[in-house]
Image (tube, rainbow, N blue to C red):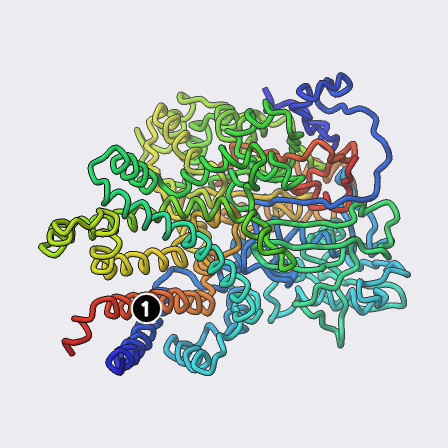
Amino acid sequence: MRAVFVMILQRLALGVLTLFVVSVVIFGATELLPGDLASSLLGQSATPETVAALRRQLGLDQPAPVRYWAWATGVLQGDFGVSLATRRSIADMLSTRLGNTIFLALYAAALAVPLALILGILSALWRNSLFDRVANAGALSAISFPEFFIAYILIFLLAQSGVFPSMVRLSPAMSFTDKLYVTFLPALSLTLVVTAHMMRMTRAAIINLMASPYIEMARLKGVSPLRIVLRHALPNALAPIVNVVALNLAYLITGVVVVEVVFVYPGLGQLMVDSVAKRDIAVVQAIALIFAAAYVLLNLTADVLSTLTNPRLMRRK
Amino acid sequence: MKTTKPHTGLTRRGVLKGATALGAAGLILPAGYRPARAEPQQGGTFRIGLGHGNSTDSYDPGLWDNLYAQVFAASRHNQLIEVGADGQLKPEIAESWESTDGQTWVFRIRQGVTFHSGKDVTVEDVIASLNHHRGDDSTSAVKLFFDPVQEIAADGQNVVITLDAPNGDFPYLMSDYHLAIMPGTDGRIDPTSTDGCGPYIVESFEPGVQAILTRNPNYWKADRGHFDRVEILAILDSAARLNALMTGQVDLIDQIDPATIGMLEARGVANILSIPGNAHYVFPMDSRAAPFSDNNVRLALKYAIDRQQMVDTILGGHGAVSNDNPIGPANRYFHAEMEAKTFDPDRARFYLREAGMDSLDVSLHVADAAFSGAVDAGALFAETAAQAGININLVREPNDGYWDNVWMQKPFVASYWGGRAVEDHMFTTGYATGASWNDSFWSNERFDELLVMARSEVNEDLRREMYHEMQEIVSFEGSVIIPMNNNYVMATALNVATPEQISANWNLDGFRCVERWWFT
């Protein structure tokens, strides 16, 4: 157990380093974007005088390293600063939207992960059967369509008839079941997008193991096929499956801006796009950091879980 | 032809299309007529879905730049002066105004109006609100309005504004949507405050998502602000907006894609309002740089564009042909009798020869950020121009950063204007030599001279003549191609009622739909 603890600490330290590098890279990239906040904020109404006045007010006339340092030290103290555009506290701006994003991601994951695992196991069990082919073809078609197309199809089928709302409006007063109801369509779209990857990996990992001698042995002993898959093959196939699930969860948190736009879902993705468009560097940095942290944490979890499922990996150290 | 049709201008010509689907015989009437309607009713929650709104929108009046901010502002604020649905100035916080010489303007401030916080609106508040847009440190988009202002002073219940030269249209500038009246402390307003003296009180605001407002029970206008609640939602995706209206999640949407108007009409679930105004789409050419420095080249391009086709395809018919005239039919001194420019490849070739050229190669830089359909409009332009021996190389620019890196940077681009209620305002901001939004860098001595003269001319006929001459100069010697006036197209749920006349000076009834409309 101690080995696991040490590994987690090592990974966390590496994660912090990664986040630092990411923040520098993002800062550098935003510096390369043409135009700055002052002219973006003023848009067509920008004149040299108003731009200069706004730049002075926002402190954009300071050199880039100075601005980066001021920001980074703030974050270390838990202060994300204020948005350059609205002068609102970034922590306030992010908290609701981060909550929304995580809610949608978990909702979609709660639908997609069991679905993918069950479909994957069943199609491995009955491989090359009609069920296997239909499940594969269905999942692959769903992943091949662009997200917005799936979203529009769902709206056409389920929203225009009035079964589900096409536009998500959340309010703090809403009950949990109401929230599940109004966010069903975006969650379903995302489920359709991510299921195929996880399902195919589950199927492939299990089929891969089915050719191993110890499975052959089990079969010769007369163990039932379902029991072989669940009891003997699945535990050994968990490592790759866990990794793919983690990757897809990270995607659900960071990559859903298209679905957010179609369903008018107030998540982080739209905020990120707006902030990039307006060159609100402070907000972009904060969101990028959250996204990077999501990836780092989920990968860390996946690593730990796959190590735990495979005692050989722990022994090696 | 819509080109030369004298426009009655100020009457509402919103077409109530789709009415037949209602089966209500009374509604099958020629455009422009609507049945007598009942008195406005109080009540209901008015939900507006707008194709604008960013998470960066703020309360600062100097920074309002999109329709979301404008409608949200009109819901909670009043200005000194309102532009009525007929285009005339109406008293708002200023109950009257006058000037004897056009140089010193006296605005009498209405008494008994209170802010949402309960504080009375005073002369000091008005001065603080105006001064927010004035001075070196101001970041306001309308800072230039106050360049000629020498002093803003209090005199009892009056605000006295002294200009450095006479300007008969100064009150029009004071009707600008940026000039919201907000409470001041020590001569300054708090630009992060929601407090105003308008029809609705802000309950919550999430930038880029939604604003929720409730009726101001102490609103001083007894016949305005009919809804109990107003919810303004940002729905950027046009399909999502349309879906929200069709499924009854919102009551009003803006910016309808021309391609979907027919579908919406066929469904019969919404009223489409198409309001002709002064808004227009433009292609400015940098008049300082060859080949655009030669007026013959500019004229060649102006005859090489098929305006009617643009209106039909880019606007889906919801607009009118413009004769390179930034002054629209809703303006007082609109010059309707100017010689109309039609698509004429031979004439274009003629002007090319005059410029000493057989053919012309130019690059047109476009992005849909300039106006919806700008890329298609550019492609259409390139196609018709090719028939006149002009090769337009269409360069697609990214939407992101368009106003920084393309507009007023590249020599030939696409852009848009919201139109202005008054000629002087339009010309001063966009066409006078050295104006900060003169996006063609155009300069014409006679035009500049007329502009200053007309500003202080008191004889109405002389003034009209001057403005007509200016429009001719801009149309035939100017460096901006203006192919079309775009209508403001919006759609409402069937139970939304509007006054007989809908304002054409800005979108959504001059942003005032929240206080002028009601539910039947």
Asked which quadrant contains residue B89, the reply is: top right
Q: Nearer the viewer, residue A211 or B2?
A: A211
Q: What chain is tagged by disc 1?
A: A
One can see residue B472 in this view: no
Give me the residue at 38% from left, 50% from top: A112
Q: Nearer the viewer, residue B400 or B200?
A: B200
Give me the residue at 86% from left, 35% from top: B39
Residue A303 falls left or right of residue A250: left
Please name the amino acid that badge 1 sits on.
Answer: Thr
Looking at the rendered structure, the number of numbered marks drawn on it comes to: 1
Residue A204 falls left or right of residue B147: left
Q: Where is residue B292 in the image (x, y as percent from the top left)?
A: 40, 41
Give me the residue at 64% from left, 34% from top: B491
Q: Where is residue B216 in the image (x, y as percent from the top left)?
A: 81, 56
**Above-or-below relation of B329 to B200:** above
Asked which quadrant contains residue B43, the reply is: top right
Q: Nearer the viewer, residue B185 or A220?
A: A220
Q: Position of residue B305 (x, y in %)?
A: 45, 28
Q: Where is residue A92 in the image (x, y as percent from the top left)?
A: 56, 69
Q: Mark 1 points at which residue?
A: A301
One can see residue B75 in this view: yes
Q: Quadrant of the C terminus of chain B?
A: top right
Q: Quadrant of the N terminus of chain B?
A: top right
**Above-or-below relation of A90 to A169:** below
Determine the residue located farthest toward the front in the rendered image: A221
